[in-house]
Amino acid sequence: MSNPELGTRLRGLSHLALNSSDMQITVDFYRNPGIPLIKATPMNFGGQHFFFDIGNGDSIAYFYWPDRAGEFSGQPAVAGQEQLDGAMHHVAIEIDPEDVEPWADHLTSLGHAFLSVVHDVDHEKNVMNDLSAMHKPDKWAVSLYFVGPDGEQLEVCAWLPALEDLAAGLPAIGTADERRVAARIRATNMSELVSKAVYQG
């Protein structure tokens, strides 16, 4: 059912996610003035996801798709609209873990398709469309991804206990060697994933 009180319990901006054409340059850009890289994780679809601490518990994040550096990275929510390196990928709003299921119920009641992902420290163990997994060990975040009225990609997310275990660095960030050995990276159209999602509670 619709729950208009959910909006009063938001915890602010979790992160703004952008696209990077060269992760090493991006990391250096933020580290030079002392902005720390606090989280880094591989993506199920290939590529890497990096978070920088910009204060007050907020982050700026980047996606890096190594085999498409300098080209289009990621996919827009609306078909036919290009999403360039440096462009926004999605906006994430932080919620409390106890509000994850009420948000899922709210989106369902309004007929909004969404994709849930419970993120594991080992990205290959991420769980889609089963929120019960958020209570298991080694889960560092849970996300509900959905599309806004103009095709913008949105997320509500809650941090989970294993967040502290997530390594801040990945080996050979964005190097030529990494690009040569990387498997073919396919950019992800989140709206396509959302359209196929079936919420399982």
Image (cartoon, rainbow, N blue to C red):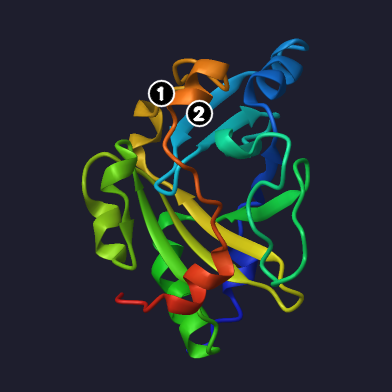
Q: Quadrant of residue 198?
A: bottom left
> Helix or strand or loop: what does disc 2 sit on?
strand
* Front residue (pair 65, 128): 65
Rendering coords of residue 138 (x, y %):
26, 39
CA distance separating discs 1 and 2 = 6 Å
Rendering coords of residue 17 (x, y %):
66, 45
**Amino acid type shown at disc 1:** Ala
What residue appears at the point 39 percent right and 58 percent down from the top-left corner? 117
> Helix or strand or loop: what does disc 1 sit on?
loop
Q: Which residue is mark 2?
A: 39
Residue 170 lies left or right of residue 198; in this view the side is right
> Height in image: 125 above or below 58?
below
Q: Residues within 10 Å of mark 2 (few under 14, many from 20)?
A: many
Q: Which residue is mark 1?
A: 167
Furthest-front residue in this view? 180
Q: Residues within 10 Å of mark 1 (few under 14, many from 20)?
A: few
Q: Quadrant of residue 132?
A: bottom left
Furthest-left residue in this view? 136
What residue appears at the point 51 percent right and 50 percent down from the top-left corner? 186
> Height in image: 33 above or below 84?
above
Disc 1 + disc 2, Cβ < 8 Å = yes
Rendering coords of residue 4 (x, y %):
61, 81
